[in-house]
Each structure stands twice: as structure tokens, then as C-alpha cells.
Image (tube, rainbow, N blue to C red):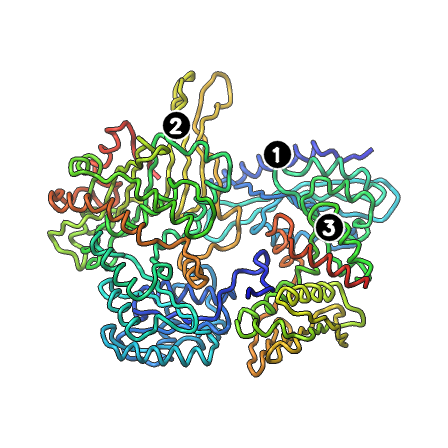
Amino acid sequence: MENPFQDPLRFPRRVPECAVTIFGANGDLTRRKLAPALYRLFMDRRLPAGFAVVGISRTPMSDDRFREKLRAGVAEFLDGGPFDESVWSAFAQGIFYSHGDIDDSATYARLGARLAGIEQARHTGGNVLFYLSTQPSQYAPAAAGIGAAGLNHGSGWRRLVVEKPFGRDLASARDLSAALQRVFPESEIYRIDHYLGKETVQNILAFRFGNGIFEPLWNRRYVGHVQITAAESIGVEGRGAYYEEAGALRDMIQNHLLQVMATVAMEPSATFRAQSVRDERSKLLRSIRAMEPAAVRENAVAGQYGPASIGGEDVPGYRQEPGVNPASHTETYAALTFFVDNWRWAGVPFYLRTGKRLPKRVTEIAIQFHSAPLAIFDGEANSPNLLILRIQPEEGISLKFLSKRPGQGMTLRPVSMDFNYGSSFGERSPSAYETLLLDALAGDATLYTRQDMVEASWAVVEPIRKAWDEVPTEFPNYAAGTWGPAAADAMLARRGHAWRRP
Amino acid sequence: MSPVRPDRLLRELAALWVSLGREHQEGDGQGVLRACTMTLFVLADEADDPSAIWETMAALMPDHPARAVLVRLARGTGRALEARVFAQCWLPFGQRRQICCEQIEISASDAALADLPPVILPLAVPDLPVVVWCRCPRTFASPELPRICAAAGKIVVDSRAMGDARAVLPTLAARALAGPALADLAWTGLTRWRELVSRVFENRSYLEGLPGASEVSIAFTGDQPPTPAWYLAAWLEAGLRQAGGAARHRFEPLAGEPAGEIRRVAFRGAGPGISIAFTAAGCAESRTGETVSRMALPPASDYTLLKEELGIPGRDPIYEKTLSAAARLAVS
């Protein structure tokens, strides 16, 4: 029976009483992202009174010590509002801790007893969300441990959230899926890609499918090319060891940027239900043309930043960062040209680039339309229209078009029509983790990736990875603080295009 | 003849933007950003404090940037109309560019109401929603209101200021059927109460007991049930029916000030005793059997109520159903 007193127009969706069990609760992600997001949801009254958090990690500590650690993380990393001690003390009553090794069956026995006690005391109805925030190598053992202890079944629902990276390649992604699916059905596995939780990425769907005027232009007939940029101005910031294993291709392209590209290019979904939206995303990912080795040379550029002086400050190169091999061949920059083999996008290049130590932090999608078929004006007249979807830092949408300059003569000048998310909607946007956690608790998987989507994106990225591993690029090939290697500019120039300067 | 001409007001607004733009470009070089998502007409009595109304508007602008037009209506027979335009700007936290909204204040006498529509309708921003906040019960009853609200997609009233609830609710129900979407701040003020009730029944075991409820009591301050009490009764009865129950409401008048405030909602027969009660300013207590939890029940203000209403651009089907049921209850 549905609660007849719900009013989705007036008060936000509520999630049922439940417990979130975080594996890797002593880690950075919990402290920086998960705990602040849960606290914020609690503060905004999005979580039920009986909500509970159970942290698991190897370090023995009391519930109170764990609460204190989380409290410090929340106070430091809370976004968009002051920390409220009274809200925290109410929230903290539902926080518990259980220590243990992921490979030890006793860990799960203890966890089971803890969850049973919480179910009784806090009326959670046996609903449990397991969140794997551990090293990726521990995802499969943790799921197996949950299954062996029978914690994947109970009187309520049981779900599993898995952080990226989801595998290192297609084979390992398939192995991991198989390991998780031995314990949880695919419908209860939530693979997190926090980019999809960003308000402005969701707004791409609203922009495309909530308006009638853009979709008719959204195809090869009107769009010349698409550029997706995710630039970071910082380096690896102490994550050198992780980054050595990942690189830009695995860290950003395989998951975040391909998901953004799928959102930009997918066909309209028949409904806004999870299955339907994910089907369309998946179809698009499967339509991306896989590159042959020769195509990789033409359409993929790897880069690694070298040392530079930025604003009078000496900035180390990647190879000089702590935890990085001084002869490392890990790419910190990737620029790729993809083609989508379907009727809508045939022949339209999708340029994706991401990198560390670029001049500024910016994520945006630029859709460049064809120029007017006949240039009847002089000067700037041939400048194509550009639609820019800005994801961060200043979320919004801009449309660049030409306008006549006031005065005598017919001189045209590009002007920009801007929509700024922050000025039209004063309310705070929830963080990606708030959105995604709430969705998982409510059983809505729309913004989570599915096994077939993960495999399709690995199938796109794997030939590039292989080609780069076989023929390494000479690194470093761009200076910190610049827009990447010259080869990336040349890649676009071959088609008569140029990267935007965001 | 009216001395106020809308084309002149619009020219003044345009000039205002030019001067604001120049001022800021010469100052911080950032210029100003015009933000507008709707036109909000406020029909207020001359006795209402205009600075309090503009303060409410100012607080609303970051969430609902609008061209705000305050019409202050004076009792009288002289056909007077006056107007002034200005802009309100704010600097969002962490940003360097000011955001500005347009504001227009018009003073009119009741006798000039008929002159008002041709003045205010051209002031609505083209293609954006128009909302009328009718604070003045006298104007709500005026035959000119439909003309004034011709472009409005939504009219916001406050039935608590409109007198006897039993008489007001059928009038509102009739208006809701005929004209643009209607919103009542008396209903808006119940959102937190309704959310607390809903929250209790998110728990499956309490939800399963809901059809067994034999009575739901609503306690309020004062002698006669105010409109919020009727709304709550109608909404709760509808929910109970949807759950398969048939419990009826019982009103419980309480002594206390101010009159017309909801103080407690209690379900009899729905599993363990379930009640939600106002305890002290800003707090409520929810009891389910032995379990007691305290929650925030922040006092509502014009700002909080309007902020919620302006966030709902179209019709609110739950409100409309409740209004119609409450009107039936009130006359039965």
C-alpha cells in the first residue's frame, strides 16, 4: 500500500527507514563526500527519523570515535551552509561502527548482528544499502562476504552501491559484474558515476527533451561538431599512486565523459523511467565507433604535463609528483575524436578532452552548428553558432550568435545570450552525492550506470589504451598551465576545427 | 484620465537598466545581470506596510526573480493613480556580478480599479508566467478582479484574512473551478503539518494500521474551525479513504492565542496512538505509541509561504481536490 499522504509537489520525496552500511568508512571518500552528503540530506529532512549509518573498516574504534571522525569531516567539507551542532547530534544518534577485515567472515557476522539490532531499535524494516567505498580490488570480496553471511537478503530491500573504477578493462569489468551478480541481482546493483548526479548534467536532459526548439537541430544536418572539455587546474594532489594505475583515459574518459557524451547524444527516451533512460544511454555508447590502431594514431592524443612556472610559482611536472614513477608513462591528458555510427550523428566528430594542470577548472559541452550556407556579410559573418552547456564552475547555458553592430554599415559581431543557473534559481543545488545517495535509497537507478553501459564504454576505450601501451608517447609533452599538447590541436585542425578556449 | 501610462513606465525601466549597466561598468566593470522568471502583481491595501511587502519581495527575488508590481489600493472615490519604478539588486555569494530585478509601485484608489487593468497588464513581462498575490480581501471580492487577473496563471490569496471559513471556502472553490489556478496561503501553511503526518506513515507498520483508524481529531486555537482546520480535515479524510478506511474528523477547539492555529492532529485506532502536536515555538512532537520524536515546525511568514507557492507554477491538484472537499464539509 502507498502512503496516501504524500504530496510530491509540496514536500520532497521521502525514503523509507533504512541503514546505509559503508565499507571503507575510514577513508577519504566517506569523510569528504558521503558523510557531508548524508548529513545535508538529514538536515534538509530528506532522510527518515530511523535512518542509520553503519561504518565498516579495519581500524578498531568505538561508535563515538567514529562519530567524532565523521563530524570533523562534515564540519570541514560541508557545502552550502553552516554546520549545525544540534542537527549533528540528532543525526549522530543513528551512526554506528563495526570493525573488521573484508576477507574475514567474522566481520560479516558482527555486521549482521549490528544490523539486526538497528532494525529493532530504529524500525528500519530490514532495508539496507551497502556502499563499497573501498579499494576496487575489495569490491568482489566484500560482495562475496555479504552473500556468504546471508546479508544480501532480509525482511526489506538490499542494495549495493559500487564506486568507480568499475574494472580496469572490459574483461575485469565483466568479471566484477559476474562476482557482484552472484550476490545481488543486477537491478539492485548501483554503479556510481558522480558526473551523472550533477545538476547540470541532469539539466542536459531537461534542456533537450523538455524544450521543443532544440531537438530538431540536434543532428548531423545542423551540428558541425561537439566538444566536451573537462579541465582541471590542479595536479594529482597526493593521489599519485592511484593516478599511476589509472591515467586520464580510465579516470575520466571511460566513465564520466563518455556518460556525458551519451547524455548529449542519446535518442529521446520514451519515458523518464530508469530502464528507458538507461536503455538509450546504453544504445548510444554501443554506437560509438571502436578505433582500429591506425585510427588511434589519428584520433587520440595522450599527454603528460611537465614542470612550469605559473604566476611566479614553480609547479612540478607529473613525474616529479609524490608517489609517481620518475619515468612514468601515465597520461594526465587525453584528447579523443569519436564518431557515433547512427543516422543522427553519422560523420559528426565528438571531441573529448580532459587533463590535469590545464589553465583553469572547467567542464563544458560546446555544440558547434554549421555556418550559414551562404556568407553575404563581410568579416565575422561566417562565424558559426555555438551552444555551450556549462557544467562547472558557473553552471549555465550560452548561445553565441551574430548581431549587427550599431551604426552605419553592416558589420556583424558575435554576441552571447546567457542563462545563468545560479541567478534564475536561487536555491542551492544538491551535490552529486546527495542526489545519487537519495536516488539509491529510493530505488531510482536512472542516474546510475548499468553493466551493459560499463562494458560498452570499456569497449570504446580499450583499443585506445592498448595502442597507447604498445606505442608510448614521448612524455612530458605539455607544460603545466597550458591547454595540452600541440598534437591535440593538430588532431582538430585536420578536420578544419579548433579547440575552444573555455 | 489616468496619469499613469504603461509605455512610460516601461521606458523608465529601460532607462533604469541603461543607467545601472553604466554605473556598474564604471564601478567594478562587471555590469549587472537582469533576472526575471515571472511577473508578480501584489494587490495590497493602502494600510498594509509597503516596506514590509517590499522586504518580502526582496527576500523572494533570489529564489524567484520577478518583475514585481505592487498596487496599493486606497479606499476612496477619487480616481487617483500614481506610479514609480526602481530596481532591486543583490550580489550572490561568491559572485562578482550583481543581479537586479525590476520593481514598480502603483497607488490607486478603489474608484480607479476599473482604470487599473489597462495600466498593469502591459507591464507583465511577455511570455513569462504572471502571478497575482491578492492580499486585500476587498479586492478579491471586487468585480474588477477578473479583468485585473486576465493575464494571470495563478492567484494567491490568504483565506485566514477573509472572514468566516464556512462562507469563504465555497467562494474559493467556485473561483478555483472558473478561473486561473488558485492558491491559498492558509493551505500552504499546512505543508509542514502534512509532511509530518506523511512522515509517520512512511513506516510500513503504521501505514498498515491506517485503514483501522476510527477517528482523526484536529485541535486548533479559537472557537470556530479556521480554514486550515477544514483543509486538514478534508485532506486527512481523503487519505484515510484512499487507504481503505472510513474515519471521520473531529474538531477540538482550544483556548490560546493567536486564534486559528493548528495545535494537534491525532489518529485514534490506527495502531499505536499516533499524534503530532505543536509543543513550543518552532517545534512539534510526534508520538507513535511509546516513541516520541521532536521535529522542527518553523513559523510561517509571507516570505516562506510565497516562496513555496511561487515554486509551483501550475495547478496543484491535491489542493484543488482538498478545497472542493473542504467546501463541501464546511457547508454540510
Residue at x-position 85% and y-position 42%: B111
Residue named by callout 2: A221
- Image location (x, y in percent) of residue A12: 54, 60
Assign the N terminus of chain A to one quadrant of the image.
bottom right
**Mark 2 residue element:** loop
Query: How many residues crowd around disc 3 within 10 Å: few (fewer than 14), some, or many (20 or more)?
Result: some
Chain letter belonging to callout 2: A
Q: Residue furthest bottom?
A: B290
Name which residue type carries label 1: Ala
Badges 2 and 1: C-beta atoms under 8 Å apart?
A: no
Residue denoted by label 3: B176
Percent across and percent down for residue A214 are 47, 35
User: Is the residue B265 above or below the residue A161 in the image?
Assistant: below
Work out how far the residue at label 3 is from the one at label 1, CA to CA, in angstroms.
Answer: 36 Å
Is A123 above or below relative to A197?
below
Task: State the residue lying farthest toward the front.
Answer: B244
Distance CA(mark 2)–CA(mark 1): 39 Å
Query: Callout 3: helix, strand or loop?
Result: helix
Q: Which residue is mark 1?
A: B14
